[in-house]
Amino acid sequence: MNFNSALENIKSYEAGKPIELVVREYGIDKDHIVKLASNENPFGCSPKVKEAVRNIIDNMSLYPDDSMVKLKNALGDKYGINLDEMVIGAGSDQVIEFAIHAKAHNGSKVLMNSVTFAMYEIYAKQVGAVIVRTASTQHDMDEFYALYQEHKPSIIFLCTPNNPTGDAIEAESMLSFIEKIDSNTLVIVDGAYMEYARFKDPSKAVDPKSLVQKFDNVLFLGTFSKAYGLGGMRVGYGIAQSHIIKALYKVRPPFNITTLSLEAASVALEDEAFVNECIADNFSQMKRYEAFAEAKEIEIIDSYTNFVTLSLSKEKNSSQIAQALLKKGMIIRDLSSYGLNAIRVTIGTEVQNSRFFELAEPLL
Ligand SMILES: *Cc1c(COP(=O)(O)O)cnc(C)c1O
């Protein structure tokens, strides 16, 4: 059967291996598997969220509130933005899909960093768009600007902090870059890890409200999957001026967020203290990874996220190391598909991290 020819050069997204699969493939007991592969919060979500979801468990027969007013009010309060300046997606992934489908078409150009979140390319190729990438692996605003002038892309992705490398753009240099971009080019600032960057170094953090006030062509993305510990609930959001949000709504399927997910995300915003404690723990555990890398003389990228990226020397092979760790029940991310001889490790709990060091020590 023939399919849309645009699909021919798309490789399906490869998610971090789920624990269930490792149990089946390697016969390892579920309790002995540690997953540090998808940048989830190892402490999960606030206990208040669990209680709130339990309390509405009988509400599953009715369709969800498609106006999403509770969550939108909570986000509006958090960021100081209006309800018509946001759209909620099943993960911010879905908002990326909305944005690309609303803005790009066959032959449009989409500019992104050489190494960045894989879904930008996948959604862009679905509409037949052409991918333009930088040469440098860390966001270089001068190179972005030169490529912008050369290609006149319809969408520019800035992922800060960037996945899978963990580095972040100086907010000031990003803002002066965006000022030079014409208003018909959509600039998407993916802030999936912005909570972490803001904690570690405010000069790397951008505030969605100031972006929306200043620019009529910027879409900011946030998610509940990382710092808020709700990866399984699939909730993310986009913040932009209302004319952009209106366009995104035209490609949104109805009832795209479940009742339980809407409740979970709304209540998660009521317990920022929980999230801040998790983030503080994250950066104190990160020091152990830095010490480990230093002791082993492995290059570690300065990270503003909840993961670290270890660049391996030529003598080591990231795929083999990821595979060897997997056999021992340690799931991490091999970055060879990004063209890097590197591994990405999500920072876990103290015990999980100790396990990683113990298993990785003889391999690295
Ligand atoms: C995890 C992640 C997302 C999206 O996560 P969702 O679970 O779909 O909200 C988006 N961008 C980056 C860079 C990410 O790492």
Image (cartoon, helix red, strand yellow):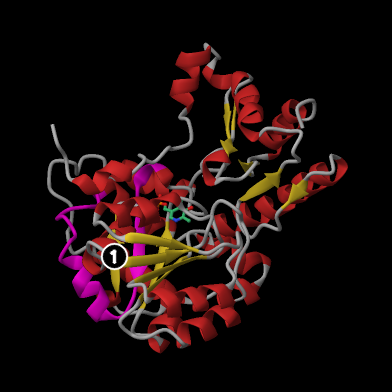
**Residue 225 placement (x, y as % from top left):** 44, 50
Residue for badge 1: 99
Q: Badge 1 local density, few (<14 within 10 Å), some, or many (20+)?
A: many
Looking at the rendered structure, the number of numbered marks drawn on it comes to 1
- In this rendering, the answer to whether 91 lies above or below 110 is above
Residue 247 located left or right of residue 189: left
**Residue 34 placement (x, y as % from top left):** 59, 29
Identify the residue at image location x=57%, y=38%. Answer: 333
Which residue occupies the foreground of this view, 130 or 218? Answer: 130
The reply to whether the residue tagged 1 has its Cβ within 8 angstroms of ligand 1 is no
Task: Work out which quarter of the rendered image holds the N terminus and state it.
Answer: top left
Which residue occupies the foreground of this view, 217 or 256? Answer: 217
**Residue 135 placement (x, y as % from top left):** 57, 62
Residue 309 located left or right of residue 242: right
Q: Is residue 247 magenta?
A: yes
Which residue occupies the foreground of this view, 116 or 223? Answer: 116
- Single out the residue that lies furthest toward the top: 27
Identify the residue at image location x=35%, y=80%. Answer: 217
**Residue 173 placement (x, y as % from top left):** 59, 81
- In this rendering, the answer to whether 229 lies above or below 204 is above
Classify residue 9 by image quadrant: top left
Residue stretch in magenta:
232-259
> Label 1 is placed on what type of residue?
Ala
Classify residue 327 by image quadrant: top right
Residue 179 located left or right of residue 95: right
Q: Is residue 74 visible?
A: no
Q: Is residue 321 magenta?
A: no
* Helix, strand or loop for disc 1: helix
Q: Is residue 35 visible?
A: yes
